[in-house]
Image: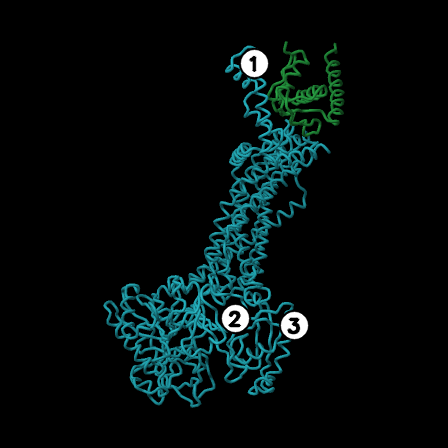
Chain colours: A cyan, B green
Amino acid sequence: MLHLVRTAAARLRELTRRSAVEAERDEEFRFHLEMEVELNRRRGLTDAEARRAALLAFGGVQRFREEASEARGIASLDKIARDTRFAVRRLWRSPTFSLGVVATLGVGVGAASAIGLLVYGVMLRPLPFPEPDRLVRVAFRTPGIDAGREHAHSHASFVHLRDAARAFSGFGAYHVNDAVNLTDPGDPQRVTAVMATPSVLTVLRVVPALGRPFAEHDAKETGTLPVLITHDLWRSRYGGDPGVVNGLIEINRRPRRVIGVLPAGFSFPVPASAVWFPLDVTVERAALDSRYLNVVARLRDGATLQEAGSELRAAIPRFPDRFPNISPADVERSDARAEVELLKDAIVAPVRQHMTFLGLTMLFVLLITVANVTNLFLLRAERLRHEIAITTALGAGSLALARRFVTEGIVLGAAAAVVAVPIVVAAVTSRFGFTSRDVPRLEEIALTPVWLVVVVLLLMLIATLVALVAFARGRRSRLSDAAQLRSTERTLTGGGWRRAQQVLVAMQVAVALALLLTASLMGRSLWNLRRVDLGFVPEQRATLEVTLPFRDYESYGQIAAFHANVLDRIRGIPGVAGAEAAREIPLIDENPEEPTLEFDAVGRETSQRASANVATPDYFRLMGIPVLHGRTFVSGDVRATMPAIVVSASLARALYGTTDVVGRAVRPPSPGSDDVLFRVVGVVGDVPRWRIEDGPASMAYFPLLRDADGVPPGGVRAPILMRSARYVLRSHLPVTQLAPAIRAGVRELDPRVPVTNFTSLEAMVDAATAGVRLTMLLLALASSAALLLGVIGVYSVVSYGVAGRRREFGVRLALGATPTRIQRTVLAEGARLAVIGAGGGLLAAAWGARIARSLLYGVSPTDPVLYATITAVSIAIAIGAALLPARRAGRLDPAEVMRGD
Amino acid sequence: MIVARVQSNEQVLQGTLDMLILKALSLAPMHGWGLTHRIEQLSSEALQVGQGSIYPALIRLEHRGWIDTEWRTTDNNRRAKYYRLTAAGRRALGDELASWRRFVAAVDLVMAASR
């Protein structure tokens, strides 16, 4: 024992002073050679002969070095190369084993790593700010009066709470506005802007890369307002020119001074933000409603979340002390409350459940991967049992054998990396198919080289550990090598492990089936969606978006005149067969700011919430929306005492129970106090609003007529002004070809109006089904992977069973059983696993589909035909995996098996 | 007359070479080259040590702690690595000798059998 320790110590010592040792050895050999040469010369040989003889006797220094290293036990690079070559050759000779391990490890660890990256990047990684665990969000709620966004503040609540609480070292408010136009220099561009107090940047401890941050006086600036721009905008629009700092740019046709550029990678609060404005939080009229500000704060050193929370809660009743406008009764009625939570928690909250679920999925995937691979290795060790026993009897040390298994493990791990790494890279590059709107912090996920190295090392580690485990179990009894050679009994594992294997494989089959079923349900939905009647004609139509600023477009008449002029110009472009405008067209991107109004039926108690649209008279004809009753707008409609309105069929039915409602009146809510009645002049066909799956939307159309020219503002009763508009044009030419002419036309009328979002309606319809398509694609990928792993799992478990029952089969064959009978027995085990797994999968799928019902369209979550076919196919595939071991069992030679005893 | 050639890859003879080296070193410390020729000399040229085997054997013995090394200057004013026996090595020499005697006795018994 002691000498082992000493040997190990000596080897370790030598490893550390390798080069010194080598130099010493060289000197020793040189001395030896010199002495031998001298001896030979004294015996009478010439110099050359003496040298040659000495070298011959010495046998070549290289061999020496090798043998000396051998004795020391340090593997030279040659040895590693040789070991690897042998390992590769051995693995090549067992293709089913090698491919099975590489596929399982590659797919399993690749998928698990990808999921792990996602969960880590979104949920676990701290926010990219200094001391991120001190950052909090302060939420303000008024359940008593529901006005404004969930946790948002009014100016009054922000100011009061900021001054009342002592627990914060910084307190800032911000608000996101995504309809801001950059007008100069270059093409007009619509961007997202953030209005923020200077304290927001100090709370986050973010310093501009160029220029200076906001100061307190910036918000009160009466001249040119200072703005900050983000790094991305600086690069894309201003070419990274540092001269833009302190220069002027034009936003919404007003000059602004750029005082700084925010650092690269800063994407708070939304990745699309481009410009920061200073926010003025002076309280003009203190109120607890009109809440729209988000508040972030930094806890003071030593302050806890609980302390901050109680301070804020204590401040609520003191609102009236600060703002006489707010009475204690107001505070009571609004049920105002303030809460503090970690900023990261607040950001991640919408997807926390999903991420946790994904995390569990990742662990599950790793578990079945390791179990499968262990199975395969144990199977192999079982098969090689005889070979190993013979090799050991002939004198190979256990160290040499272990080294062999380890090398194989490393080679397999490296091969699996070739499969796993592209999976991880593809998943991260495609952002897992999500958008920033679905998943917060998505843009923070990065695949650093560190992760890749970790994945590769993990693969090699798993493979090596499993190989060693299999090796260890195979070598459990050194003394009974001879007994091992003789016996054919399965010696490797007990019944407990076998049961566990079977359960895991059944679970794999279940998961594969559940995923397959869900994927096919989505596929069916997609098929249905593409066949639904949209209610309008997308072919040969294209759309573009135009946004008018406030200045110069304050009245209905000004707006209508602009649109009419531009549409005339567009109609004049060669190739354009017609152009109309509407505020909102079907299937555009979801925008929760789009207005809906509550319409009351006059003469009845019914009312219905519907989206309020504005359209030119020939819009319906251009879009192919049928006019079911009545007419569309004509001149004079908007100036009549009862202005005209056109409703969609579903709105008519909701209000009056029938679509024939021409002549009836509806009352939309009015901004002023006077009740304005609108007369229905026409009923048009339904179109979907945002998603095809949601079905037809109740919609009311107000007219956009140019005969309102010259009517003073307020003289036209229209609840909605169409400053942002979507033009639809009909042409056989692609919209990209028409774009320059359209831009020129708009520029002629007003060079500061941006023209954006050129797209064909067909592309828009495609995009509407993109979400379903993507989900289906992901599910299809996941289910194929799961099926592959399940098949490998079934194969390995059944093979394992066969290996253990060799003797039993041999006896039965010797006693007269037919090979077919044996095969059937084996297949029966495979079938048992498949059916049990399928049962679990069916239950899981039915339950899961019920939950995801909203994603399905036109197909029941438990569609029997679909379920039956897919289940049958899956069971067949799983049984197919058991065919190979079954055939092998049938081909057993009973004599050989018996002889082994 | 050469009776046997001691190669390094035969287990039994490997042990024998170790014993021979220990014995030679017990008489006087020596460098590697000197050892190969000393063993030859002690056996009256009957045993010729393969020059490839001596160094692995020496390293083995050094790992076991049975011999020690030291760089010295030879009589010809050259630097050489000298090996010498440790206390443990001296004890090991006694054990190896006993084993060897038993082995030889056993072989003799077999060879002397007439039935």
Label 2: which residue?
A200
- Residues at circles 1 and 2 in contact by the CB criterion of under 8 Å: no
Label 1: which residue?
A40
Residue type at mark 1 is Asn
Residue A851 picture location, percent across and down = 54, 64
Viewer-nearest of discs 1 and 2: 1
Q: Is label 2 on the same chain as label 3?
A: yes
Residue A264 picture location, percent across and down = 46, 61
Q: Is label 1 on the same chain as label 2?
A: yes
Residue depicted at x 27% and y 71%: A745
What is the secondary structure assignment of the residue under circle 3? helix
Q: CA distance from mark 3 to mark 1?
A: 94 Å
Residue B76 picture location, percent across and down = 61, 19
Residue type at mark 3 is Glu
Specify few, some or many for label 2: CA neighbours under 10 Å numbering under 14, 14-19, or 20 or more: many
Chain under disc 1: A
